[in-house]
C-alpha cells in the first residue's frame, strides 16, 4: 500500500480504489467507531464525501476503509495559484454553506461536545470555564450539519473539478456560526489575511453579522485549547482572555 499522508496517531494509505486510515494502537476505539459512524450518517445526506466501505482491524490496529479520491487538496491548489485566491475562497464558502444546509439528526450535538470540552479544560480557571459554559448556553440551538474542521486541506478537488470533503471525525449537528468560527480560527492560526477574507465572504453570502460569529470564538478557542497543540496555546488563550463577558 502507498502512503498518502501521515498524521498524529494515524497513517492514510492508498490500496487500489480504496483509502485506508490506519490508527495507532493508542487511539481510542470509541473515537474510531464514532468517526466511521459520523461519515456514514453524513454520507446519507448526499454531500460529496468518500463512501465508507469498512471498519476493520489490521495487524491489531483499527482501520477505516473508504473510497479513494484522486486529486489535489484545495489547500495545495490555493498555494499554487495565489492570484485566484479569492475565487477559491468563494468556492470554499459555497461548499461549507452546502454542508450547513443539510441535516443529520443522529449526529452528536455540537453544544454537548463543547460543554464536555470546556469542563475538561483544567488549564483555565473555574471562573473562566463558568463564563464559557454560560455563553455557550446562551447561543441559539440549531441542528445543521457542522464539519468541525472545515479547512482547505480537508477538501479534495478531483481531475474534473468536483470537490470531495474528507475527515468527518469532528462532525456534529448544531449552529453553523460555530462551525464558521472554527474555520476562522484555523485560518487565523496561520494566515490572518485569509481569515479576514473568509469571514467577509461567509458573512456576506449567509447574511450573518460578524459579531454573531465572533461571539462563538472564545468557545471554539477553548475547545481547541483542550488538544494542547504545541505553538497554539498562547494564541488560543488570547481569544479566551480578551472577551468582555456580559
Image: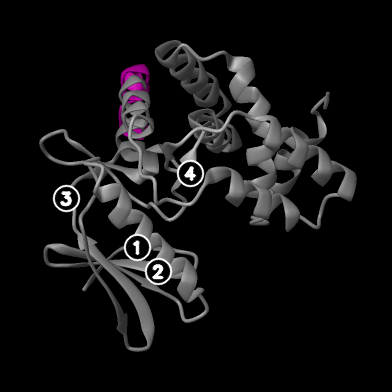
**Nearer to the camera, 31 or 7:** 31
Contact check, label 2 and label 1, Cβ < 8 Å: yes
Cα distance, mark 2 to mark 1?
5 Å
Local secondary structure at mark 4: loop
Residue at image coords 70%, 44% = 222
Name the quarter where the N terminus is drawn.
bottom left
Mark 2 burial class by Cα count in 10 Å: few <14, some 14-19, many 20+: some
**Nearer to the camera, 180 or 136:** 136
Task: Give the residues in magenta.
Answer: 79-89
Local secondary structure at mark 2: helix
Residue 129, x across and y down, in percent:
80, 46
Left or right of residue 172, residue 127 in this image: right
Residue 80, x across and y down, in percent:
31, 33
Display coloring: one colour
Identify the disc placed on residue 36.
1
Q: Earlier in the sequence, mark 2 or mark 4?
A: 2
Residue 83, x across and y down, in percent:
34, 19
Image depth: mark 3 or mark 2 in front: 2
Which residue corresponds to mark 4? 148
Q: Earlier in the sequence, mark 4 or mark 1?
A: 1
Image depth: mark 4 or mark 3 in front: 4
Which residue corresponds to mark 3? 70
Overall secondary structure of the magenta section: helix
Local secondary structure at mark 1: helix
Which residue corresponds to mark 2? 33
Cα distance, mark 2 to mark 4?
17 Å
Cα distance, mark 4 to mark 1?
15 Å
Cα distance, mark 3 to mark 1?
21 Å
Image depth: mark 3 or mark 1 in front: 1
Contact check, label 4 and label 1, Cβ < 8 Å: no
Q: Earlier in the sequence, mark 3 or mark 1?
A: 1
Cα distance, mark 3 to mark 2?
25 Å
Amino acid at each position: 500500500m502507498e502512503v498518502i499522508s501521515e498524521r498524529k496517531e494515524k497513517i492514510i494509505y492508498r490500496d487500489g480504489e480504496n483509502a485506508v486510515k490506519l490508527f495507532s494502537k493508542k487511539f481510542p476505539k470509541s473515537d474510531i467507531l464514532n468517526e466511521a459512524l459520523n461519515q456514514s450518517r453524513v454520507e446519507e445526506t448526499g454531500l460529496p464525501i468518500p463512501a465508507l466501505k469498512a471498519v476493520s482491524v489490521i495487524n491489531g490496529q483499527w482501520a477505516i476503509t473508504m473510497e479513494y479520491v484522486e486529486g489535489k487538496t484545495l489547500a495545495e491548489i490555493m498555494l499554487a495559484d495565489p492570484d485566484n485566491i479569492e475565487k477559491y475562497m468563494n468556492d470554499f464558502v459555497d461548499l461549507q454553506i452546502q454542508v450547513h444546509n443539510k441535516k443529520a439528526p443522529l449526529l452528536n450535538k455540537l453544544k454537548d461536545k463543547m460543554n464536555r470540552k470546556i469542563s475538561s479544560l483544567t488549564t483555565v480557571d473555574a471562573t473562566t470555564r463558568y463564563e464559557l459554559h454560560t455563553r455557550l448556553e446562551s447561543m441559539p440551538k440549531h441542528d445543521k450539519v457542522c464539519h468541525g474542521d472545515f479547512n482547505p486541506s480537508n477538501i479534495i478537488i478531483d481531475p474534473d473539478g468536483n470537490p470531495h470533503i474528507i475527515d468527518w471525525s469532528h462532525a456534529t449537528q448544531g449552529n453553523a456560526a460555530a462551525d464558521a468560527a472554527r474555520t476562522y480560527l484555523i485560518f487565523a492560526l496561520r494566515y490572518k489575511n485569509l481569515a479576514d477574507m473568509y469571514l467577509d465572504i461567509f458573512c456576506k453570502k449567509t447574511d450573518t453579522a460578524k459579531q454573531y460569529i465572533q461571539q462563538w470564538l472564545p468557545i471554539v478557542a477553548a475547545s481547541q485549547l483542550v488538544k494542547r497543540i504545541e505553538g497554539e496555546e498562547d494564541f488560543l488563550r488570547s481569544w479566551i482572555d480578551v472577551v468582555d463577558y456580559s
